[in-house]
Structures are given as structure tokens and as C-alpha cells.
Image (cartoon, grey):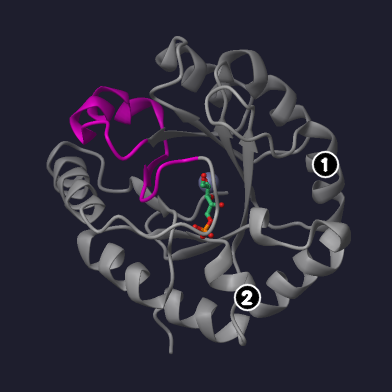
Amino acid sequence: MIIINDIIVSVSLLASDMTKMAEEIRRCENAGVDWIHYDVMDGHFVEQISYGTQILKSVRKCTDRPLDVHLMVERPDQQAEYFAEAGADIIDIHIESPCDTAACLKRIREMGKSPALAIKPKTPIEEAYPYLPLCDMVLVMTVEPGYGGQGFIAEMTAKVKSLREYADNNGFPSLNIQVDGGINEKTGAQAKRAGANVFVAGTGLFNANDMKAVNSALKGTL
Ligand code: DX5
Ligand code: ZN
């Protein structure tokens, strides 16, 4: 299901008009986005609360695109199963969440879903390396998780570069590296040069005059 090492654009629904989610998803599909990024916030791991499994089930009915569920929650080990049942294809859990990260990634794989490991800006990227055999993707946060619409932290490109080099040199050439937060045509290009291949954009796509043009720019086809 994951197209390894392809360039993927994933739209974050957090920036959509949630009163007309189905229309918003159609608009994203028409613009050519590859995946739908679904940000789950629990009010503990991050301050805000976003949405949970009920809304995900409705989203699942609206689209066949892969659903990439970013769990910004205290206990992803207690939540992953519910999101898998609700229609997630990819489940991103945070290395900083206080649970058994390896066991949780393995469980996601056992459920037939694609496991991904997310890492906050202040956590050293080396902490992700032991988990590479257990995941299809690493999500390098390029803002502090918790809010859409923040500015890209430029220093995160160094983390992406280190991760890509490590992955290439240690038997993980097909690892997907996702960047999330403040991604637009310009910052997406910086992240791509560093080795990222999956680009999450919320406001960058939804606030654009021409969503299709932004999608094409991120894909590198403009
Ligand atoms: C931040 C979320 C992001 C966010 C991206 O906590 O994980 O996915 O919605 O939004 P933009 O693209 O607006 O920074
Ligand atoms: Zn996210």
C-alpha cells in the first residue's frame, strides 16, 4: 500500500472546513493529493483535542486514498487498535509517548497496518534508529506538534539528512521519511533536498488559491 520511496503528498485535514469534510476531501482528491493525514490530539500529549475514531469512520467512507493517522496521544498502545478498526492504513505513533514503542509498532504491523514512528523537534533523531526494522516510515516533525499553521523549523532538515544517510547505510534504503508542519512549496523543496519523500501539508494546501499547483510543486512536477 505504501509506495516506497515515491514522492507522496499527504493533506492534513486539520486545516479543512470540517462542516463540509466530504467536499473538502473531494477537493483534495481532485487536486491530486496521494494520502489523507488525520491528526489525532488527546489534550494530554498535546494541549488541544482534535477528533477521534467516529470522524475517521466517516472520512473512510468518503475516500479510497490511504489514511495516515498521526496519533499525538499519551497512550498510542491503547488507541492504535481502535483507529485500525476505524479505517486507518498507516498509524504514526510518537517515540515520546510513554508506552512500549517497539511493542506498539509490532502490534500495528500484526493488525495489517503500516507502522510509522513520529519524532518531535527536540528529540535527537538517533533515538529513532533502533526502531527502523519495525516501521515503514519515520515522521520528522518540522513544528512542535499541537497546532496547524505554524512556521517550519529549518534546522529539522539536518535531522532528515542524518536519518536518510543512516537508513541508506544500514539496510533501510526504502524507508519513507515524512515531514509534517509548515510545509509549502519552499520548505517542502528544502526537506526534499535533505531526503524527505512524504510531505504533509494542511494550511499550505487548504489556504492556497490553487491547491493543484501546490500539490504539483510538492510532487516536483511543476
Ligand atoms: C501539527 C500536525 C500537523 C499539522 C500540519 O501538530 O501534526 O499535521 O496539521 O499543518 P500545517 O501544514 O498547517 O503546518
Ligand atoms: Zn500531523
Position of residue 199 relative to residue 107, above or below, is below
Q: Is residue 134 magenta?
A: yes
Query: Looking at the image, which residue sits at the far front?
Result: 47
Which x, y percent locates residue 62? 84, 57
Which x, y percent locates residue 79? 66, 20
Judge from the rendering whether residue 172 lies leftward or rightward of residue 198; answer left or right: left
Q: Secondary structure at mark 2?
A: loop
- Inter-mark Cα distance, 1 to 2: 23 Å
Q: Is residue 140 magenta?
A: yes
Residue type for callout 1: Ile
Q: Which residue is mark 1?
A: 55
Position of residue 40 relative to residue 37, above or below, is above
Which residues, given as a range, are shown in magenta?
A: 120-145
**Split into 4 quadrants, where in the image is the C terminus?**
bottom left
Does label 1 or label 2 sit earlier along the sequence? 2
Which x, y percent locates residue 175? 33, 45
Residue 29 lies in quadrant: bottom right
Q: Nearer the viewer, mark 1 or mark 2?
A: 1
Q: Residue at x 64, y 13 (%)?
A: 78
Which x, y percent locates residue 77? 57, 15
Q: Residues within 10 Å of mark 2 (few under 14, many from 20)?
A: some
Position of residue 107 relative to residue 24, above or below, is above
Q: Residue at x 44, y 9 (%)?
A: 100
Q: Which residue is mark 2?
A: 32
Residue type for callout 2: Gly
